[in-house]
Amino acid sequence: MKTVNVHEAKTTLSALLAEVEKTGQRIFICRHGKPVADLVPHQPPDRLAPHPVMSAIEIKYDPTEPLSPDEWPETD
């Protein structure tokens, strides 16, 4: 893991971005020797993974079951 100070990150941001893009490694940006930020490669969200809240929903009936005639809404 590479560490750079804030001044170096500001002056060489384009090169740091190219390095993260090329290697996929994270870079720590430090102020006075203490990490304050991470420069990491972008990871698009997994669209196939279920959302934690949505996966907790339980359907207690068969949504493909046809409606009976008395369950249809009234039309006038």
Image: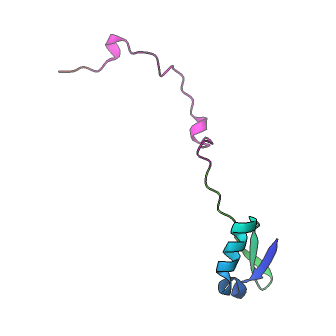
- Magenta highlight range: 46-73
Residue furthest left in the image: 76
- Where, by quadrant of the figure, is residue 5 drawn? bottom right
The quarter holding residue 9 reads: bottom right
Q: Nearer the viewer, residue 30 or 26?
A: 26
Q: Is residue 38 left or right of residue 73?
A: right
**Relative to 52, is 16 above or below?**
below
31 sits to left or right of 66: right
Return the x and y of residue 20 as percentages of the image width and height: 71, 69
The quarter in which the C terminus is drawn is top left
Residue name at image x 76 percent, y 81 percent: 4
In the rendered image, residue 50, in percent from the top left (x then y), is placed at: 61, 40
| Magenta stretch holds residue 50 | yes
Residue 18 lies, with reference to residue 72, above or below; the image says below
| Type of colouring | rainbow
Task: Farthest residue to the front: give it.
Answer: 22
Q: Is residue 64 or residue 24 the one in the foreground?
A: 24
